[in-house]
Image: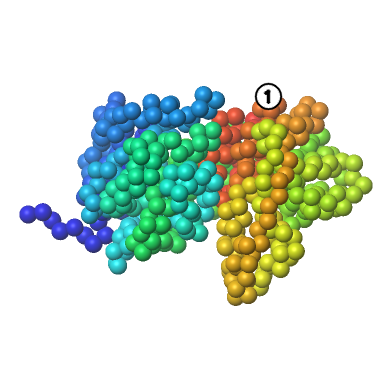
Amino acid sequence: MPRAAAADEVFATISVCHPRDIATWEVVARHMPRRIAARHHRVIVPDDAVPLFRDRSPAAFDVIGESRYAAGLAELIARHAPPDATPRTGWYLQQFLKLRALEDVPSDEVAVIWDADTVPLRRLSFVAADGRLVHWKSAEHHPPYFAAIERLLGMPKAVDHSFVAQCLAVRGRWMREFIAFVERRHGRPWLEAVVASIDFREPSGFSEYETLGTFVACTHPQEMVATNRPWLRPGRRRVGTARNVDRAWASPLLAGYDFAAFESWDEPYAAWTSLLEGRVGSVARRLRRLARRLTGRPCDAEEFLARWFARPGLKTVVQVGANDGEQNDPLRRFLVRPGNYTAILVEPLPYYTAKLRNLYRGRSDVTIVEAALGAEPSSRRLHFIPPEIADEMDGDGPANRWAHGQGSFDREVVAHWIRANTFRGESYRRRLSAYLDAIASVEVPVRPAVDVMPAAAAAGDVLLVIDVQGAELDVLRGVDWSRPPRAIVVEDDLGRGAAVAEFLLDRGYRHECGDHDKVFVRAWRPA
């Protein structure tokens, strides 16, 4: 007689893994059966790795060779990627494998797609008491995902958060409805339509989580519910490799999180590696940094900038997205007085470049550039909040002039932050629609970053600081990588750090520190 299913039990978990991640997978696989109630746990791997994964996975897992789902996928990607693009075939392939595996889920069942580098830390339930499916949230907002969704589904962003949160519960009938909808809309097989919707010039042009989540949020909004429970993305930065999850010293650092991701791009606690590698610098300072890591307080961009500006020798800082030079500006306190540096401040909006010129009037060591930076010369429409409207948007506080710092080539990014500030009081909330309607736009010139960046030999150590609300990769693509900057600080308040980190790691950088403002260094660190 078959056993009765638990109320929160799902039909299956579905993960895709590569042999290079087997060490992390062993930890994930050990925790999943204990913390996610499912009748089946499935991992899809390259065919020649099936014996390895069967040997290294608990008996609860069905190990499936990817050929069961991969037929024609690589060729499909190659057919739709333009000749000048270098698509991350493996990255896209693992998403398509999960989507095809969802076709096996019975209509009346629930499956959970789960990232193979993510360790569940407590018992998780994906089915609420009222039958709605629970999903976790992230703050990521990656415009290429939504551009692809618009092309594929014709549907707008439907929630004020992201579905890119390492896992997603999906009903079998939702997947069938998604397939039928796409095939009716495009008149071709659904996966071919999905691939055709992707801009392969983008390093990350599609998300299965964001796409399915948006589809369900638009078609079945009453059947899903978001949880505010926290999860941890930079698990490696917090405790090192996934194998440390079960160590007693790591438990306090992971307490309170539902799950933690151990992504390969994330640099394990850099203070440990710095000390072990014997890099130049005082042991006491290294130990203090190590202590901050172990207590969950890593070094941040502000500390890094203080050390960088205090370092002797000629240096140049290039700030992209300088705004007015004061509002939430991480460089302002270092640029107040001349020193052994020169500064190039790049800002496309004339209102703010005028403020910059006034702020640094008479300073020959500070150059103001009125433009946006990108990969090649062009012009683009920049969306922003008019200054006279921004002046009134602090609401009940804090009085930090935050709205003056919002400018993006993606209008939805500006709208996202307007909605995200509804905590500023009832009067702000009453004016929310007016604030959204007030978003303005203007055509601005885009200059290649190489035209603005100085040659390292002539300018000493070069530091690049980027705050461009979603256009980070455009700026980085325009850098002359034959003479790269020594350090790069990238604001990541939209949760897009993975693509930027991967881009920079491929070019010889390492993630030094920081979560919101991420610091990357190249074969060098300040003393």
Left or right: residue 69 versus residue 301 is left
Please indicate whether residue 1 sits to the left or right of residue 162 in the image.
Answer: left
- Quadrant that contains the C terminus: top right
Q: Quadrant of residue 95?
A: top left
Decide which of 477, 509 is in the foreground and name it.
Answer: 477
| Relative image position of residue 219 (x, y in whole percent) | 37, 57
Percent x, y of residue 373: 70, 39
Horizontal and vertical percent position of residue 348: 74, 46
Work out whether residue 389 or residue 328 is closer to the camera in this orientation and state it: 389
Please tell me how crowded label 1 is: few (under 14), some (14-19), or many (20+) other residues with Cα within 10 Å.
few
Which residue is at a point 62% across and 43% down the rendered structure image? 471
Pointer 1 residue:
482
Which of the 4 image quarters holds residue 65? top left
Q: Is residue 477 left or right of residue 105?
A: right
Q: Amino acid at mark 1?
A: Ser
> Secondary structure under badge 1?
loop
Q: Residue furthest left?
A: 1
Residue visible at 64% across and 65% down in the picture: 435
> In this view, which residue lies farthest toward the right?
362
